[in-house]
Amino acid sequence: MPEREPSLLDDLYREILLNHYRSPRNKGTLDAPTCSADGANPLCGDEIHLEVELEDGAIDAVRFTGTGCSISQASASMMTEYVAGKTVAAADRAVDDFQRMMIEGASPVDDFGDIEALVGVAKFPARVKCASLAWKTLRQALEHPDIAEPVTTDDRSANHG
């Protein structure tokens, strides 16, 4: 069976991912975060530290630091850009929508913008964990900021978000 040639859409998605990886948005730290969380993908070594500043039930600012593959870092950049300014409830719904997009291949409810470039990752289960790390870490920061143990993408962990 001949190998399929990449489509223009595949090329566009690849460019979007590389752009976010090479020039990440919201990378850094906050002076006074309201909540934060750490995340790790033990399978490939991705790590993320996420800081969130909340004001009146909304995400006023969000920053991340960390290391990892292009998918994990690009996803973190896209996620921080998307949730900034959203209410905590809207950000939580976005985490659910993202997980459905990754696991079920479902179309996002809202316009996910650049995040839709990650839809092709759903074909590669090991890479889904890379793309999901920032999102699971955001949920941990917003819902359980008192848990010091990092959220992980390891399915065997009791704390996998």
Image (spheres, rainbow, N blue to C red):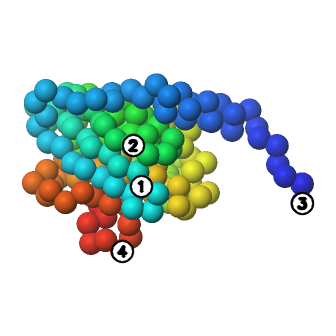
Q: Are discs 4 and 3 less than 8 Å apart at CB? A: no
Residue that sits furthest to the right in the current view: 1
Nearest to viewer (mark 3 / mark 2): 2
Q: Spatial distance from mark 1 to mark 4, Cα to Cα?
A: 16 Å
Looking at marks 3 and 2 on the same chain, the residue that comes earlier in the sequence is marked by 3
Residue 103 position in % (x across, y down): 50, 60
Residue at image x 84%, y 52%?
Answer: 3
For numbered disc 3, what is the local secondary structure? Answer: loop
Does residue 117 appear anywhere in the picture? Answer: yes
Q: Which residue is mark 3?
A: 1
Q: Amino acid at mark 4?
A: Arg
**Local crowd at mark 1 within 10 Å, few (<14), some, or many (≥20)?**
few
Q: Which residue is mark 4?
A: 156
**Local crowd at mark 2 within 10 Å, few (<14), some, or many (≥20)?**
few
Q: For this rendering, which residue is in front, 37 or 96?
A: 37
Q: Amino acid at mark 3?
A: Met
Q: Is residue 113 above or below residue 129?
A: above
Q: Amino acid at mark 2?
A: Thr
Q: Quadrant of residue 62?
A: top left
For numbered disc 4, what is the local secondary structure? Answer: loop
Q: Spatial distance from mark 2 to mark 4, Cα to Cα?
A: 22 Å
Tell me the tag on residue 67.
Answer: 2
Residue at image x 46%, y 57%?
Answer: 44
Residue 115 position in % (x across, y down): 48, 38
Residue 124 position in % (x across, y down): 59, 58
Q: Amino acid at mark 1?
A: Gly
Looking at marks 3 and 1 on the same chain, the residue that comes earlier in the sequence is marked by 3
Residue at image x 40%, y 34%?
Answer: 77
Q: Quadrant of residue 147?
A: bottom left
Tell me the tag on residue 45.
Answer: 1
Q: Are discs 2 and 1 less than 8 Å apart at CB? A: yes
Q: Spatial distance from mark 3 to mark 1, Cα to Cα?
A: 34 Å
